[in-house]
Image (cartoon, grey):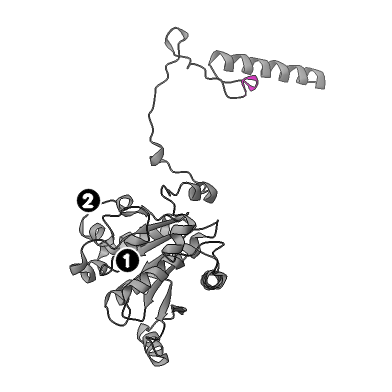
Amino acid sequence: MDDNKLYNALLKSQGERSRSGSERGEASVEDNFRKERPYADSEQGRPNWIRVDSNDNEHPPTLYDSSVSLSLIANPRPWSREQLRERKIIYSGMPDKKVMDAYRELRIQLRNLAHGDRFTVMFSSLGSNGSEGVLTAFNLATALALDSHTSALLVDCDPYNDELDSLVSSPMDKGVTDFVSDHTLSIRSILYPSGIERLSVVPAGTQASSAVELFASVRMRELITELQTRYPDRCIVLNVPPFRENTEARIIERFADQVVFGVPFGEVTGETIAESVDALDSDKFSGLIFQE
């Protein structure tokens, strides 16, 4: 067969396939694969489509967009600058620039130790007053949330102190100990907006008498693991009772990548700090925050 006959045969074959495809209801090139066509066995040419209802939650997106995720973090009752100042919560542009810069430097150092990845840091005061620790832990989480590319979560694991209530703009109810003791509760039911953009909080809960056993449970491990892995741009601060006086801090330490101690002004000696670091018996120790 010469070249002309071969070319004509190919054209004829292509035309037959195109007509055949049209008869079977297949999409042609001109349709750009966007027009729906009935199946060949549709009754009287009407499409025999079947409606399938799907739940978007069953098929989460495979690509994660941090800008979308961060914009979805609820903050229905944001604190004003005056309210932040009254509560001694740090904020960008605050008059005491030294304090703000100190927390920024702390954020940088923690990120460097984590090699830029998300991390979980445990904060515990070496003093005896747990209320000072709650404020410092909250400000540490706030410093992390001030980074526009990061979300932060403060998980309060100090059920003996209720100072967190005064730092959060939304009323809180159930918390960590309630979730661990009640298997019907969902994680969503213990997450609350803080009043700070990109910062959420989980309160300690109401089951203080059995906190040690609850923190040591399998469900507690499952809770922290879920919180750590749900979002790739989230940093977590675990606030625990004073390290030297409570067992809870030793239990929670296993969930942390880093540990930071708070040093209340005039309460703690250098010897006490050294003993506490030795008692931690871990290479997770990252540094000290001196509290005034």
Residues 13 and 57: in front is 57
Q: Quadrant of residue 15?
A: top right
Q: Earlier in the sequence, mark 1 or mark 2?
A: 1
Is residue 99 rendered to the left or right of residue 250? right
Across and down, in percent, residue 143 comes to 50, 65
Across and down, in percent, residue 79 comes to 44, 54
Residues 158 and 102: in front is 102
| Residue 163: assigned label | 1
Q: Is residue 57 above or below residue 189?
A: above
The residue tagged 2 is 184
Helix or strand or loop: what does disc 2 sit on? loop
Q: Which residues are magenta?
A: 28-33
Across and down, in percent, residue 251 comes to 30, 74
Residue 188 forms part of the magenta stretch: no
Q: Amino acid at mark 2?
A: Thr
Residues 3 and 32: in front is 32
Badge 2 crowding class, 10 Å Cα cut-off, few under 14, some 14 to 19, many 20 or more, is few
Q: Is residue 14 above or below residue 67?
A: above
Q: Is residue 103 above or below residue 223?
A: below
Is residue 121 rendered to the left or right of residue 3? left
Residue 29 forms part of the magenta stretch: yes
